[in-house]
Amino acid sequence: MFSGSIPALVTPFKNGIIDEAAFCRLVEWQIAEGSSALVPCGTTGEAPTLTNEEQHHLFKLCAQTAAGRVPVIAGCGSNDTQTALWHMQVAKELGCDAALMVAPYYNRPSQGGLLAHFGYLSERVDLPMVLYNVPGRTVTDIQPETVIELARRFPQRIVGIKDASGDMTRLTAHRMALGAGFAQICGNDDMALAYNAGGGVGCISVTANVAPRLCAQFQAASAAGDMPRAHELNERLFPLHQALFTDASPAPLKYALARVHDWLTEDVRLPLVACSAAARQAVDAGLEHARLI
């Protein structure tokens, strides 16, 4: 259902307020540059610092601006099942095509709790879900057996996973149980080449915010089996992939975007702060290596 280069969109701020014009312009640019879907209000969008009203407004802006040209996968996850349900209901009403659903964080549910959480949501909202497994942030790890059980119980609802676990063996476990129709999407830009080779179909990407065309071209080359071209593009992007995580994300990314576009600022919301001088130096070098500045 979903594949290719899918940016996890930043949320532009100006003087602490969402810059709606910049957000809509970013959406337009992403579509023009070849991104295959859009994720508002994910980790890169600083979702934990957004009010519910802001989050829902960004769903609306993204869906209205995309206007059906590419799917919108709204970041609806929460560690409270009822809040996640509400976000999903609103996302559906506002025209989003799917929900990105992070594993509940902080309260650390068991695998049985994860089955109950995602099952509850699947039974109550007619909206496809892409599970988001990022145990480095959530502590909770959606184990392959749980992913497989959910996808088998709810094949019309649980349609894929954004996997940022770093465990490549899960690709084969998921694929053997669920087949190629279950969308396995990489959650780490610097692992996307190997992930696609193992059966992945794309990346929900940080780097695509600032290098959408190159990321889209990389994903297209991977999908076509043009490995020399995929390697070439991966190596062009690789220093930037790494530079964007030399400080708390998305601060380095917002610095990169401000370097490339004069209509975006590097503003982040507390508790995040602007990235360090060392991170800026790394980002500048990555942008130069990618020939973006």
Image (tube, helix red, strand yellow):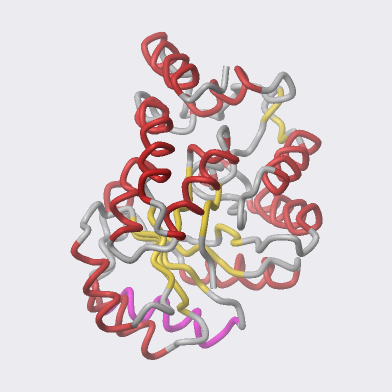
* Dominant SS in magenta: helix
Q: Would you identify the image quadrant in which residue 144 lies?
A: bottom left
The percent coordinates of residue 94 (x first, y second) are 75, 66
The percent coordinates of residue 160 (x first, y second) are 44, 71
Residue under the point 36% across and 89% down = 152
Q: For the magenta stretch, what is the residue range?
A: 112-125
Residue under the point 71% across and 35% down = 18
- 108, 208: nearer the viewer: 208
What quarter of the picture does the N terminus occupy? Answer: bottom right
Q: Would you identify the image quadrant in which residue 85 lies?
A: bottom right
Q: In this view, does 28 lie above or below 141?
A: above
The percent coordinates of residue 230 (x first, y second) are 40, 45
Residue under the point 45% across and 57% down = 202
Q: Is residue 90 above or below residue 32?
A: below
Q: Is residue 122 magenta?
A: yes
Q: Is residue 98 above or below residue 11?
A: below
The percent coordinates of residue 131 (x first, y second) are 42, 67
Q: Farthest residue to the bottom: give it.
A: 153
Q: Is residue 85 above or below residue 186?
A: below
Q: Does the magenta stretch include residue 116?
A: yes
Residue under the point 42% across and 43% down = 229
Q: In this view, does 158 lie to the left or right of 126?
A: left
Count of numbered badges drawn on the protein: 0
What quarter of the picture does the C terminus occupy? Answer: top right
Q: In this view, does 179 lie to the left or right of 280?
A: left
